[in-house]
Image: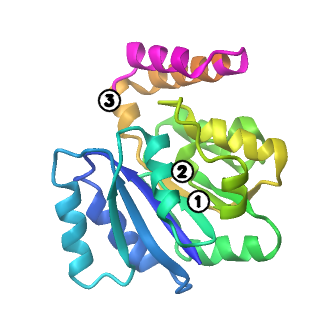
């Protein structure tokens, strides 16, 4: 059974569309719950989610609260999840039709952790170039926007996401999976929002993300990455 875990913070603009998308694009009947972990939203994110759930959703919705911070929020969701497969999804990322069947098929084949390829909802040449590399099964090509499925046993063995990371938590955790377990990339695409690129400027944001990756590879700690992000990137 799959538990879908979505950290949210002020996602009123997209949460209804995402929940509807999950409802209509899941096919297996094996999603036991969709867990929204709210980091203290001050907009209509949670009322909109409850409204959708109460008006005919097929998927059981669980809403819980956590201190803000994607790593903390995802760990909170995992702690209450009942599924033996955890599927972590960003609130602005939309998985393909039958995503749940695709995940289950991989787990049945012995691939107990992995992600999808990714496309942006933008035709900017830089983003088209960037998304091309998500097809390759290398640690350096991974990121949280590609979503992540992982068996509960692996998540627990790795002690979940490192809550020291305010950013880069997905890459850190996925990197630890690569170091100890088999990782697979499913040959289908999630579609993720390019809104942060539009806000910051595509070339500028791509440059800063590259610097963050390089800093981490050179040994920068979580605090240093966070300080660089807050100084240079508009959330």
Q: Which residue is mark 1?
A: 189
Q: Position of residue 110 (x, y in %)?
A: 82, 69
Task: Give the residues drawn in magenta, as a range.
Answer: 216-235
Q: Earlier in the sequence, mark 1 or mark 3?
A: 1
* Other residues around mark 3 within 10 Å, as few (<14) / some (14–19) / many (≥20): few
Q: Position of residue 228 (x, y in %)?
A: 48, 14
Name the side, left or right, on which 171 lies relative to 76.
right
Q: Earlier in the sequence, mark 2 or mark 1?
A: 2
For image coordinates 50% across by 41% down, the residue present is 71
Residue 123 appearing in the image: no
Name the side, left or right, on which 13 lies relative to 229.
left
Q: Are marks 1 and 3 in contact (CB under 8 Å)?
A: no
Kindly indicate the quadrant of the structure image that contains residue 224: top right
Cα distance between the residues tagged 2 and 3:
18 Å
Pick the quarter of the image with the N terminus. Answer: bottom right
Q: Which residue is mark 3?
A: 199
Cα distance between the residues tagged 2 and 1:
6 Å
Residue 11 appearing in the image: yes
For image coordinates 51% across by 50% down, the residue present is 75
Name the side, left or right, on which 220 lies relative to 139.
left
Pick the quarter of the image with the C terminus. Answer: top left
């Amino acid at each position: 059974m799959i538990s879908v875990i979505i950290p949210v913070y002020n996602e009123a603009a997209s949460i209804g569309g995402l929940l509807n998308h999950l409802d209509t694009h899941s096919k297996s009947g094996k999603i036991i719950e969709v867990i929204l972990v709210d980091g203290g939203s001050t907009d209509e994110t949670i009322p909109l989610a409850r409204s959708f759930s109460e008006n005919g959703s097929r998927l059981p919705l669980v809403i819980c609260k956590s201190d803000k911070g994607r790593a903390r929020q995802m760990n909170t969701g995992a702690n209450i999840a009942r599924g033996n497969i955890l599927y972590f999804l960003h609130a602005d990322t939309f998985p393909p039709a039958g995503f749940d069947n695709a995940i289950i098929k991989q787990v049945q084949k012995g691939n107990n952790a992995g992600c999808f390829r990714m496309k942006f909802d933008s035709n900017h040449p830089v983003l088209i170039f960037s998304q091309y590399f998500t097809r390759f099964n290398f640690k350096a090509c991974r990121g949280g926007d590609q979503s992540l499925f992982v068996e509960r046993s692996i998540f627990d063995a790795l002690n979940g996401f490192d809550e020291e990371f305010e950013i880069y938590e997905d890459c850190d955790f996925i990197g630890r999976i690569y170091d100890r377990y088999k990782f697979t990339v499913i040959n289908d695409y999630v579609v993720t929002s390019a809104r942060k690129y539009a806000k910051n400027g595509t070339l500028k944001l791509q440059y800063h993300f590259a610097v963050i990756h390089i800093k981490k590879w050179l040994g920068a700690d979580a605090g240093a990455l966070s300080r660089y992000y807050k100084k240079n990137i508009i959330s």
